[in-house]
């Protein structure tokens, strides 16, 4: 094996980043590997599985985790090798008329005892498994960020649409009030109050539009794409979350799916193997050193095994350090498990509360729509004026925004619950498990 240089060119890397797109053949091939059809994204829109796969392909954070995984597997190769033998040679000259040449060959073979090589391999295997699970854990964290950004973008876009409708209704109300003020039917403070509400609604609409732009930029950053690559894309929200009763089984089985819990278990297994290795090292290896020498025309053969004498210590210091590290990893596992339980319980409670809030907001919106329909009927019958109709439209728009906000909080609560149990609530295929754990991702 020879050294192969790999120079970093920041300018070329930037150009490659800006050239990324949803039409890249490498991305489509990667999507096919994880069970997705990238050719349908343009027509059907980008949903959460598609965005997750794109992020697993382009996001550099997963590249870092994958590089650590490869390094851990390389360490596994190093752990399994046997010690190379050594050869000590020498030659000389003696002022002897019969045999002036002198030379010797002294090879040395190390025989490992007490199963040290096996413990090294088992420790490296556990460390490699922990590194693999760290890649999947990074994928789950990426999926949560992608989902949050997707929710923010979609709901900011919908909020801007509702605010535009509310702005139109408020503008109509101001128009009616201004006409009445001109004939003396209403006072100026009533007109000014309506104008201020119209201005506040206009500011809220612009804020929602700004939030949508920022959310799209965040979504592009999460997926590892330039913002221009997503500018013309259509997006799909995850399916509407179910009632709290439908996620109780997922909540109960949450710890079985937590990657950080499984990773902590793998790290504990590695620390336990490291302790076993240090205990095995208190038994010395055998250094077998056969030798051959030619001296004074005589062939001399020797066989001298060498053993280090455990006189001053028997690896007690290293054993104590390994025991302390294992105790540390054990405490860390307990902390990770306790944190996982708390996250699942907290996320489940938040989801139940958000569900009830959304249900109430939906009921209020339905009731307001019925009131607006009743006002419209009386308006068409000549029993109500345009101001009542405009005010009813404003009230419906306000109720619709409240329902939209409640629906957004429910989606965010569902995202937090999925992140806590690390299992999709809607039965989505495990895209994260397949996409994140791809070793070789060509970009």
Image (cartoon, helix red, strand yellow):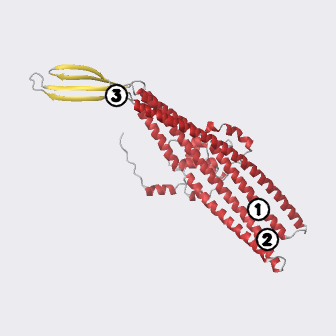
Residue designated by label 2: 173
In the rendered view, tell whether residue 434 sits above or below residue 235: above
* Left or right: 305 as drawn, with respect to 150: left
Q: Residue furthest left?
A: 97
Q: Residue at x 90, y 68 (%)?
A: 383
Instruction: State the SS at label 2.
Output: helix
Query: Which residue is painted at 75% across and 74% down in the image?
Result: 192
Please state which of the two labelled residues, at mark 3 or mark 1, is closer to the viewer.
Answer: 3
Which quarter of the figure has residue 185? bottom right
Residue pictured at 28% horizontal, 26% vertical? 107
User: Of helix, strand and loop, which one carries label 3?
Assistant: loop
Spatial distance from mark 3 to mark 2, Cα to Cα? 94 Å
What residue does disc 3 label? 312
Percent x, y for residue 418?
Answer: 65, 44
Q: Quick one: label 3 or label 2, which is nearer the N terminus?
A: 2
Q: Nearer the viewer, residue 50 or 313?
A: 313
Q: Earlier in the sequence, mark 3 or mark 1?
A: 3
Dot 2 or dot 1: first in sequence order is 2
Q: Is residue 42 visible?
A: no
Position in image of residue 145 (x %, y %): 60, 50
Q: What residue would you read off at disc 1?
A: 397
Q: Residue at x 76, y 61 (%)?
A: 398
Is 151 placed left or right of 299 in the picture?
right
Quadrant location, the N terminus: top left
- For residue 333, above or below residue 11: above
Query: Is residue 404 in sight in this rendering?
Result: yes
Q: Quadrant of residue 290?
A: top left
């Amino acid at each position: 094996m020879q050294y192969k240089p790999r120079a970093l060119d920041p300018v070329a890397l930037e150009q490659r980043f800006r050239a990324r797109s949803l039409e890249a053949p490498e991305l489509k091939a990667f999507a096919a590997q994880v069970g997705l059809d990238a050719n349908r994204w343009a027509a059907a829109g980008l949903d959460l599985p598609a965005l997750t796969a794109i992020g697993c392909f382009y996001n550099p954070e997963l590249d870092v985790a994958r590089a650590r995984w490869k390094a851990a597997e390389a360490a596994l190769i190093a752990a399994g090798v046997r010690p190379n033998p050594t050869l000590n040679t020498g030659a000389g000259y003696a002022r002897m008329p019969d045999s002036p040449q002198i030379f010797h060959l002294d090879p040395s073979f190390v025989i490992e005892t007490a199963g040290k090589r096996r413990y090294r391999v088992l420790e490296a295997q556990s460390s490699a498994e922990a590194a693999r699970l760290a890649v999947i854990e990074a994928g789950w964290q990426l999926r949560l960020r992608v989902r949050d950004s997707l929710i923010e973008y979609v709901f900011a876009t919908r909020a801007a649409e509702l605010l535009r409708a509310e702005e139109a209704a408020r503008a109509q109300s101001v128009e009616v009030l201004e006409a009445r003020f001109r004939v003396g039917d209403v006072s100026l403070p009533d007109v000014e109050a309506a104008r201020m509400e119209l201005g506040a609604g206009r500011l809220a609409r612009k804020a929602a539009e700004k939030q949508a732009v920022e959310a799209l930029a965040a979504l592009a950053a999460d997926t590892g794409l330039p913002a221009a690559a997503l500018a013309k894309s259509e997006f799909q929200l995850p399916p509407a979350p179910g009632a709290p009763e439908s996620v109780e089984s997922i909540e109960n089985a949450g710890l079985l799916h937590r990657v950080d819990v499984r990773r902590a278990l793998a790290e504990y297994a590695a620390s336990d193997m490291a302790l076993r290795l240090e205990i095995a090292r208190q038994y010395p290896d055998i250094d077998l050193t056969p030798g051959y020498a030619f001296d004074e025309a005589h062939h001399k053969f020797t066989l001298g095994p060498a053993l280090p004498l455990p006189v001053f210590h028997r690896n007690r210091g290293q054993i104590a350090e390994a025991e302390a590290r294992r105790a540390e990893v054990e405490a860390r596992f307990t902390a990770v498990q306790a944190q996982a339980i708390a996250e699942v319980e907290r996320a489940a409670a938040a989801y139940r509360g958000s569900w009830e809030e959304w249900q109430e907001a939906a009921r209020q919106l339905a009731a307001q729509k019925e009131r607006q329909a009743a006002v419209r009927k009386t308006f068409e019958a000549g029993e109500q004026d345009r101001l009542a109709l405009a005010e009813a439209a404003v009230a419906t728009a306000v109720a619709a925004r409240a329902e939209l906000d409640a629906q957004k909080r429910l989606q965010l609560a569902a995202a937090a619950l999925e992140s806590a149990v690390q299992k999709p609530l809607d039965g989505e295929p495990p895209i994260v498990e397949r996409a994140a754990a791809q070793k070789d991702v060509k970009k």
